[in-house]
Image (cartoon, rainbow, N blue to C red):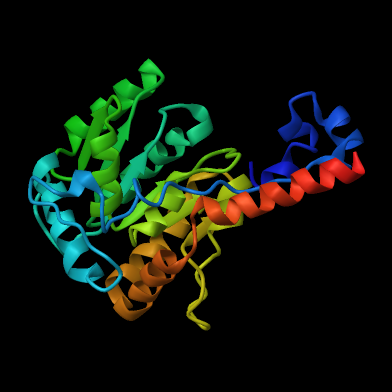
Amino acid sequence: MSHGYAWEIKTSEGGWGLHGIINENDWKLRGIVNGIDTKDWNPKFDVHLKSDGYTNYSIETLQSGKRQCKAALQKELGLPVREDVPLIGFIGRLDHQKGIDLIAEAIPWMMGQDVQLAMLGTGRPDLEDMLKHVESQHRDKIKGWIGFSVKMAHRITAGADILLMPSRFEPCGLNQLYAMNYGTIPVVHAVGGLRDTVTPFNPFEESGLGWTFDSAETYKLINALGNCLLTFRQFKQSWEGLQKRGMMQDLSWDHAAEQYEEVLVAAKYQW
């Protein structure tokens, strides 16, 4: 779990009845963000990008590589192959925790924008039906992949411009880390590990890694995503800066392992 989630589980909302005992023991509670498998989830070596028109790429070949992966993804999903249209991805369980209902409520607004939406996941039957329904209404803009496919998860991560993660709670979250490693910009609800790993874009300092919104409400998701789309369309240099900063991070387990080591040493001498 992340540092932020460690704080959240000490509250009555986040602790689900265990917040009392967690608070009594909070001196030995420490949140550590996960690392990612940088061999498996690496655009330079990703085995799922070696066929069907996809390509491996690195920070040096980011623009041409991502352009090719996006076109291949659009083709595979049966969406119009257009470089200029922002392609938004969602990968995750279809349930209340992942905020899929917020995306559903935002779809009428999204469909008024010139965007494409690729969603991969499985879960609650009513949410699977909802996904099938919105796809049938907007076949040229939405593709819903019911079920789970490791290959498709890698390809959406590589081919999408934006990854949407409106989770109501998230102990750490991996998809936003994978996305940043692939030069895909996260738009996330600022909770738990999402808040800890996605620093908001600051256009004045050209800093930050993505967009966040501070409560699980549809209009806040729309506001964050709207600002993201504006930057994608009108401020290409800022967009490339966001992509490169995301890819330059050390998201490996080496960094997380050092923190685990510190906790184990502290436990040995203090508990």
Q: Position of residue 130 (x, y in %)?
A: 32, 26
Check the picture and name the quadrant holding the N terminus. Answer: top right
Is 177 situated left or right of 7 in this image? left
The x and y percentages for residue 11 are 79, 37
The image quarter in which residue 66 lies: bottom left
Q: Is residue 190 visible?
A: no
Q: Position of residue 166 (x, y in %)?
A: 48, 44
Kindly give the residue lying farthest to the top in the view shown.
125
Q: Looking at the image, which is closer to me, 160 or 44?
A: 44
Write down the quadrant of residue 168 in the picture. Answer: top right
**Nearer-the-camera pick, 269 or 44:** 269
Task: Residue 68: name its quadrant.
Answer: bottom left
Residue at 87 percent of width and 29 percent of height: 20
The residue at 49%/62% (across/down) is 250
Q: Quadrant of the C terminus?
A: top right
Q: How many marks?
A: 0
Name the foreground residue: 219 vs 135.
135
* In the image, residue 131 above or below residue 62: above
Question: Is residue 182 visible from the viewing direction of this image?
Answer: yes
The residue at 48%/45% (across/down) is: 218
Left or right of 144 in this view: 91: right
Residue 203 percent coordinates (x, y): 48, 78
Q: Residue at 65% of width from left, 48% of height from top?
A: 32
Query: Is residue 268 found left or right of 41 in the rendered image?
Result: right
